[in-house]
């Protein structure tokens, strides 16, 4: 009697597992279709997506400049400089080109902020604290931008290699 129940339960569980597997496969195919549609739209509108990166960068910079100039917020949680965070986020998302732009914008904002506080131009050039801050901006921007671009390049190489392998099979 117990063996019959185990057999029936096993069949029910097996059928449930098959249904779950079918749902997983269905979800995976829907996700693949969605990403292929996004990729096709991206390839068609590559110019729009590149312009969108510039727009995002400028809008994020406007937010950072507003927080720094109008609200006197330079540090986040007392540890993270909001300008460095902005550079890191843009570098991680968009790569070296946008990261370089965000670095240049932050350096310009830093100079503007220092000049507004009464620093002289010569003092800005020779002050070691200011040069250290600029070095941090440059390092963060170039490093994160490079890492982001390099990882995208590796992904593209792997994808191309995988496509070649599939064509050969």
Image (cartoon, rainbow, N blue to C red):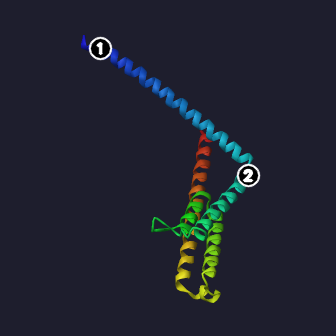
Can you give x and y, in whole percent of width and height, for residue 95 in the image? Answer: 61, 61
Query: From this viewpoint, which residue is outermost toward the left?
Result: 2
Assess disc 2: are there few (<14), some (14-19) or many (≥20) residues with their C-alpha within 10 Å of its C-alpha.
Answer: few
Q: CA distance from mark 1 to mark 2?
A: 62 Å
105 and 151: which is toward the camera: 105
Can you give x and y, in whole percent of width and height, for residue 48 in the image? Answer: 73, 52
Query: Compared to 114, does 56 lie above or below?
Result: above
Q: Is residue 121 left or right of residue 144?
A: right
Tag 1 secondary structure: helix
Query: Compared to 147, does 123 lie above or below?
Result: below
Q: Which residue is mark 1?
A: 5
Q: Which residue does the image show at 54% across and 77% down from the upper left?
A: 133
Query: From this viewpoint, which residue is outermost toward the top?
Result: 1
Query: Compared to 5, does 69 lie above or below?
Result: below
Can you give x and y, in whole percent of width and height, for residue 52 in the image? Answer: 69, 54
Q: Quadrant of residue 164?
A: top right
44 and 166: which is toward the camera: 44
Q: Quarter of the image containing the C terminus?
A: top right
Q: Which residue does the image show at 55% across and 86% down from the upper left?
A: 127
Q: Which residue is mark 2?
A: 48
Assess disc 1: are there few (<14), some (14-19) or many (≥20) residues with their C-alpha within 10 Å of its C-alpha.
Answer: few
State yes or no: discs 1 and 2 in contact (Cβ < 8 Å).
no
Tag 2 secondary structure: helix
Q: Quarter of the image containing the N terminus?
A: top left
């Amino acid at each position: 009697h117990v063996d019959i129940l185990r057999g029936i339960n096993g069949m029910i569980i097996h059928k449930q597992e098959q249904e779950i597997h079918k749902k997983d496969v269905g979800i995976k195919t829907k996700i693949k279709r969605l990403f292929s549609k996004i990729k096709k739209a991206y390839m068609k509108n590559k110019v729009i997506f590149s312009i969108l990166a510039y727009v995002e960068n400028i809008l994020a910079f406007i937010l950072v400049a507003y927080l720094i100039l109008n609200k006197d917020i330079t540090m986040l949680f007392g540890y993270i400089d909001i300008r460095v965070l902005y550079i890191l986020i843009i570098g991680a998302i968009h790569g070296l080109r946008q990261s370089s732009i965000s670095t240049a914008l932050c350096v310009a904002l830093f100079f503007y902020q220092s000049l507004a506080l009464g620093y002289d131009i010569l003092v800005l050039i020779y002050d070691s604290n200011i040069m250290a801050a600029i070095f941090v901006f440059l390092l963060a921007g170039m490093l994160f931008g490079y890492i982001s671009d390099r990882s995208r390049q590796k992904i593209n190489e792997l994808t191309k290699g995988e496509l070649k392998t599939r064509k050969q099979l």
